[in-house]
Image (cartoon, grey):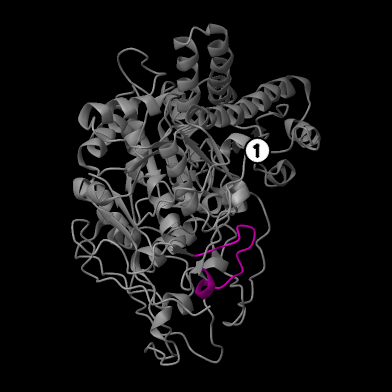
Amino acid sequence: MDRTPSLTGSEDCTDSSSNCSVPDTPANWSPNVVGEHYSIPMDEIALQPVMRADLPLGGSREGRISHSVRRQIRNVCCIGAGYVGGPTAAMIALHNPHIRVTVVDRDERRVRAWNSRHLPIHEPGLSDVVRAARDGLRPGVDGTGRADASNDESSTRAPNLFFSTACAETIAEADVVMISVNTPTKRRGQGAGRATDMTAFEGATRDVATHSRRGCIIVEKSTVPCKTGQLINNITQQHRPELDFPVLSNPEFLSEGTAIKDLMRPDRVIIGCETTPSGTAAAEALADLYASWVPRERIVTNNIWSAELCKLTANAMLAQRISSINSISAICERTGADVGEIAKSIGLDRRIGPQFLKAGLGFGGSCFRKDIASLTYLAESLGLPEVAAYWEQVLTMNNYQRDRFALNVVAKLNNSLRGKKITILGYAFKKDTGDARESPALDVVRILLEEGPKSIAIFDPLCSEADIRYELSALPAADAQDIVKVCADPYEACEDSSAVLVLTDWDMFKLQARPAPVKAQPVDSPMIARFSPSTPAELLHLPQRSKQTPPTTDRGAVVVGSLPEEILARLQPQAECGTGCEECLLVSKSMGSKQRQEAMDWSRVATLVRQPKMLFDGRNVLDAAGMDALGFRLETLGRASTI
């Protein structure tokens, strides 16, 4: 098949209200990527679209939908530039270069961050995907950085991912609107502490109903209570009763720290629709977007209520496993059993499996607690108090685990923290993310502050001091901000400490031998050694030429991203940050990200802390024998105390 015409698009077409809304490429052309394999070069994936076969949707019997009606999608609008909206839109844009994808948000600062070299969230591989779709790709370059004449212009990829605050204009041009706004737990009023706060979601839906055009497909991406689809229908009928807006539920199943990997190779894509001709046609159109890289058999269609409820159910089941193994850890500490050995043994049972069976401080983050609370409130509102009580116990056990960990720290320090410094290593609720929301560390800090310590020093390689202090502002202790110090250096945090607490399972905290340096592979190798497994290395790999020197770069510039220089040469140059950029200043003043994540030298820590070198492992990441050899007195959840 002949190579398709080059994707064209003016650099001025970043305003969603302009007429240049779609790159000039036929709408029925799409990159066809086999989801199981990612060794195909970028030329084959994102630069050379091929005609997609008209395959039926896979999944349940109910999910097989007719292809008699085909919708052509040229514009996708995603409302909400957060942890779900940004990465999801970037992945859709990357695999569908013929479609314009615009993420809108009213937070101007967040939108500026997405359009800059400093993305507002950290996810391994995210910067790679955003740059390829947002900035586009230019023809290959030679060793001097000049355009290589041997590369024709058809290898050029125009930008098709945009971030904007022009909400109304973007919605008005969209064929599909994905609502990915925050849906936190209500803090006041009926259902406070459990019910979902739908304020932002309702506002976004009203905007869609007011500004969207006839036939626009409305997609729920936010985690919402069951029957939210009816809420959307009610709002659209109030504002535009003469129009029909198909409503779909397309829940996300991303895990922070592996979001790009989860998007690249999802276990399943769930699409819930109404059982009407317009509903099934809309589901088919959305499935086509995902089918450009997800195998059809992994795209499952359900009725809309099942799709809405499956997200809450999935998170509740995962959280249940964590609370279950944590309950066993308490028994282990009283009996001398080892919860790690138990988890390994039962995980070998194929009916159970090993996932989510690691004892620790419990689950945190913005999803599990919120979704279980929403599920319990839903059960109560449906007159099912026994069901609500069952799931409420999962939260009770989660709170109990972190409380007893903190109280054990106080007990082992002679029931007094007066005049003592406590060190916390890791604030994020899990490794490989800078998200400080709903961290178990917050509850630990709360209990420690009640005992009046001299100071609490916190180190985390990714969480910003501003985010940590924002979370601490919710604590009742008036002097919390004065007592707590956020350190950029883990050794500074440990100096003169009476106890060190490991609260996040960062790899850098594990006691391990330093790995031997990996030799760089030739530039024309199909794999590049420096990519992490969660980075779409194969997807972004371009044919390279050996015996060529990559273009030189300004060593004084701030290095952003993990792409090799050979591939960076194919990306459009990023705009320089303005004078006084806060992010650039922060990078220049603090330790570099890689340096902050270097493996801890625990022998050095042993020389810094006070006797008797108390160490509390809240994540089961430390080797007991190794720590004992360094003179530490180690306490680990799920193992009998040795102190």
Name the quadrant of the C terminus. top right
Q: Is residue 284 left or right of residue 72?
A: right
Question: Tag 1: Cα neighbours inside 10 Å, few (<14), some, or many (≥20)?
Answer: many
Q: Is residue 426 above or below residue 153?
A: above
Q: Which residues are magenta?
A: 31-45
Of the pair 16 and 558, the residue shown nearer to us: 16
Q: Which residue is mark 1?
A: 620
In the displayed orientation, state which residue is furthest to the front: 68
Q: Is residue 408 above or below residue 353?
A: above
Dominant secondary structure, magenta? loop
Residue 523 position in % (x across, y down)? 57, 82
Residue ID at (20%, 37%)? 210
Q: Is residue 492 above or below residue 4?
A: above
Residue 579 position in % (x across, y down)? 19, 65
Q: Is residue 641 left or right of residue 213?
A: right
Q: Is residue 94 above or below residue 238?
A: below
Residue ID at (47%, 10%)? 380
Residue ID at (48%, 49%)? 490
Q: Secondary structure at mark 1?
A: loop
Residue type, numbered disc 1:
Asn
Q: Determine if residue 249 is in view.
A: no
* Number of marks in picture: 1
Q: Is residue 496 left or right of residue 171?
A: right
Residue ID at (45%, 92%)? 150
Residue 3 position in % (x across, y down)? 47, 79
Of the pair 55 and 234, the residue shown nearer to us: 55
Of the pair 419 and 304, the residue shown nearer to us: 304
Of the pair 182 and 27, the residue shown nearer to us: 27
